[in-house]
Image: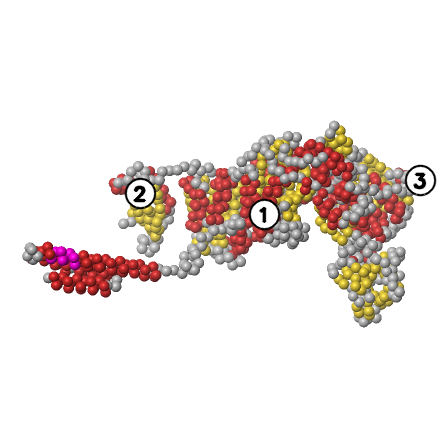
Amino acid sequence: MKVSLNWLNDYVDIGEVSPAELAEKITRSGIEVDAVDDRSEGLKNIVVGYVLECSKHPQADKLNVCRVDVGEEAPVQIICGAPNVAAGQHVVVARPGARLPGGIKIKKAKLRGEESHGMICSLQELGFDGKVVPKAYADGIYVLPESAEPGSDALAILGLDDTVLELDLTPNRADALSMLGVAYEAGAILSQEVKLPDTSHGETGDPASGMLNLRIDAPEANPLYGAKVVRNVKVGESPDWLKARLMAAGVRPLNNIVDVTNYVLIEYGQPLHAFDYDRLGTGEIVVRHAGEGETIVTLDGAERKLQPHHLLITNGREPVAIAGVMGGANSEVHDGTTSVVIEAAWFDPASVRRTSRELGLRSDASTRFEKGVDPNRVLAAGERAAALMEELAGGEVMAGTVLFDELDKEPVRVTVSPDFINERLGMKIPFEDMEKILGRLQFPYEAVNGLFVIDAPTRRGDIAIPEDIVEEIARLYGYDEIPKTLPVAESIPGGLNPYQAKRRVVRRFLEGAGLYQAITYSLTSEKEAQKFALDTAPVTKLLMPMSEERSTLRQSLLPHLLEAATYNTARQAGSVALYETGSVFLAEGADGLPVEVEHAAAVITGDWSGSEWQGSKRPVDFYAVKGIVEGMLDLLGLTGRLSFRKGEMAGLHPGRTADVLLDGERVGIIGQLHPSEQKARDLKDTVVMELNLEEVLRKENEPLLYRPVPKFPSVSRDVALVVTKPTESGTLESAIRSSAGNLLKEVRVFDVYEGDKMEEGMKSIAFSLTYQDPEHTLTDEEVTEVHHRVIEALEAEGAKVRS
Amino acid sequence: MEQQLNQLKEEALGAIRSADSVRSLNDIRVKYLGKKGPITDLLKGMGKLPAEERPKMGALVNEVRGKVTEVLEARMAVLEEEAVSRKLEAEAIDVTLPGTPAGTGNHHPLTRIVEEIEDFFISMGYEVAEGPEVEKDYYNFEALNLPKGHPARDMQDSFYITEDVLLRTHTSPVQARTMEAKEGQPFRIICPGKVYRRDNDDATHSHQFTQIEGLVVGENIRMSDLKGTLDRFAKKMFGEEREIRLRPSYFPFTEPSVEMDISCFKCGGEGCNVCKGTGWIEILGAGMVHPNVLRMGGYDPDVMSGFAFGMGPERIAMLKYGIDDIRHFYTDDVRFIAQFHRAEG
């Protein structure tokens, strides 16, 4: 909402308060002022000129040589390129030395050999937005009324001696979508009365109802409709003050009739519509819902297809307006209009909102109706418009208003105690101060038994409950006055729950291991959504995505992490190590929501460990990432319950992929990216992992208990085995563990050899076994006996002990 | 024999003196003192001497052997020390070569901010509450005093999945869910999480971003408690010398509603490019929980009251670290993330 302070001053005395000061006060007490626009800023030496003569420039077709009276003894010569400049016009002249917006300085100049003492200005050159400049002057200079005195300051006539406040309104303060609403707000802040506009006008002897019939077929959607008829209007340009105010408010002046409806809309916040009575054609207005397949061409020239819940204004035969949204082209006021019907109505906010959304059509009217207009201001706005049409268009207002009225206009009664207000705020505002604030707000109230009984004015639709009064009192008393305290309550210990605490442990571990945390988007393309998914389920798609790239919720974190790896690699990162924890979405769980599961994933590409100059740098491999997963699960106390088996997944290397099992259930995957996938993504050898983090973190581990440090020494025995190449070390290790019994403390692979010293198809794996008894020092015989059992078990698995 | 012995002694001592390595010294030890050496031979030959000469000669031989041994050990100690020195010298390294990287990664800056905020409120007795990112319209809007058709729904255009399910537009549905779960008991929570809005991604907008929100419900929770809490928070997060101010605002789920500004941490309130010349920076929205929200959560607004606040970690990170484009947070450029690895203070 743009608020001209000159205009505002009509209703409330701003007095000596500076615009910046006023803006600060308004912001601090409730409505944010986005900008304070001093419209005269940068404008200097701009006067009224009268064009005495105008002839073509001898050297240039598109230029004119004008002799202009600028209020001095002798006229001056000004060269002007505007197509509409002519002798006999009063114009805006920037004299040499003048300044225009954008820091432009006007100097004496020679244009194609002719001297120019200044510039005749268009409105755009004076800083007006092209969107609000009247169409007649859009492509040329602006023409002032004849009453303008040559040499006088032109800024006042154009309304540029003004400051405009731009209000950023929250949805609850629809009341401030009007000059009167802002006047009440300013009045409350400055303790000033509000003066209402003059709505008095003359009336003809004939009643309006003699010319117009009214029928409302949808009273729920349109409980109040008032129509006034004004005869014998002369459509023409509005006076300068009116045009200036509309332009200041951001509205383009059109003609005096439409300008009046727009002016009153801004003044009262009540949208009005003016129909051409003759074009209406039937002397009748019927408000009803649209029929199936009905259409209307709106003022903007577009044909709109309507639905049966859209409310229409019709002439009894065909639609002439979409109620509260936009008028129809067929009944528009035009230059030849002589009789006008002024519509002042109240439409159901939800209905207007829905219609405007569905048609994709927002207007100054719909934005106000959908937030609710003041029921008690509807008819007054109609009278005000009639009065202005009488004054500015010479119209005759027909007697009375053609009216349908079932609208509840009662104020909301709010009862609140001063104690409640102070308790909520943690303050001790005296009763009298609260009374003063209610007075400044012009809220009618009575103090009954120490309670405030307030009839909230209908212009303030946001006031309905005691808490609203708390806010009104507090904001005008000043939020700076609220003391700083802390809640006095039994203190509850705060903290992370075990899941959250373990998640932090996981993040820190992964970072300690050398990975950077990434955060990627949850939305991806449908094509990518299920790639690398541990568990696939139907995808969750948006109803109306903004793009195919962001249309579907992911089921794996890896696609976006790999994208990030490629992004970094393309920017000369030799190696990249990223991880992410975040949700994947598997449609569809109970209660209509997708199953949301938190995952952890990592991508490592390029070199991983070691030091370059020492020659120990190595590219990442499967085992580096497996080590990270093992370390992470160990930190969570789950080592003994973790196992791995050969796995497979599209996009991963078929020989270098493992399922991660926890308590025998698959909770994740580790694998090297498939060579073709690596190539497609422009990556070197890349190893990835993804875990169902939620599953992992939900596992409860054993309580952490001290175990005695062994008192007796352990004994190590190594065994080197020859096995067929496909034999997995895990199988051999299981055989060792199950045959060795309690004395076995540790099994470690310490060598794997597949070189040419081995028989074809065979490899060697060497284990180191550690035996220990907590009760005594093991004897050689005891160890040999167990070790023998182990070797027998290994041989049963087809392994040969290597001598 | 005595003469022979003295000659042997001089010879041995001479050899010891001229020995220049542990090894040659060991050779000398074997040569003179070994089982097959001349001194041993002399001792063996003692049996041939007349009995009265034996003690004298024995003492003499032992004396010579003692002397040679003593000198040899002393020389040995010197040579060993020299050998160690030589070895250490040979083992010297270039200490200015780079160390072997003890590679660590680090938190994403948003996690860093979120954890800092979480930890502050945990110290004030808050629990961390989380909820689903795909939400029911009921929890995202209706339970927060935003019925269907409410004009404030325009403030946050949403990604719908079905008519009743959407990507949450704020973390506030966690408030509604927590109230249901706490069944009328007082509580304090802080809720971090991802949220989604229909925005085109540019320098200041992101269709996915994070929020962190707090809610305190109990008997006689006052607006002054909100102000005191936010004041402590602002000082912890942005420095002890920060001041806060509250400005009236509007959120459907709070009444009264406020926005909180902090005095500019760059210029201290003088006015600069960070605070756009105002001396104040907008940090968060807050307010007293709307009675409708309490009621829908199963709390009697006549008995209980509460306050809530919410903020954007992206905005806080951008202000705190001087980051100029919100897209940096979601590009995952390691050159960006790695800048947030070190401790502050």
> Label 3 amino acid?
Gly
Nearer to us of marks 2 and 1 is 1
Residue at image x 69%, y 42%? B248
Near-viewer residue (A464 or A163)? A163
> Label 1 amino acid?
Gly
Q: Which residue is mark 1?
A: B239
- The secondary element bearing badge 2 is classed as loop
Q: Which mark is residue A714?
A: 2
Seen in the image, is A247 located left or right of residue B172?
Answer: right
Circles 1 and 3 on the same chain:
no
Residue A508 in the image: state x and y as whole percent: 48, 46
Extreme residue toward the right, this view: A205
> Label 2 amino acid?
Ser
Residue at image x 33%, y 50%? A764
Nearer to us of marks 2 and 3 is 2
Q: Which mark is residue A205?
A: 3
- Calculate the distance from the C-alpha at mark 1 to the C-alpha at mark 3: 75 Å
Near-viewer residue (B156 or A269)? A269
- Calculate the distance from the C-alpha at mark 2 to the C-alpha at mark 1: 57 Å
- The secondary element bearing badge 1 is classed as loop
- Residue A556 among those drawn in magenta: no
Circles 2 and 3 on the same chain:
yes
Nearer to us of marks 1 and 3 is 1
Q: What is the magenta range?
A: B57-64
A290 shown above or below B49:
above
Residue at image x 79%, y 59%? A44
Q: Earlier in the sequence, mark 2 or mark 3?
A: 3
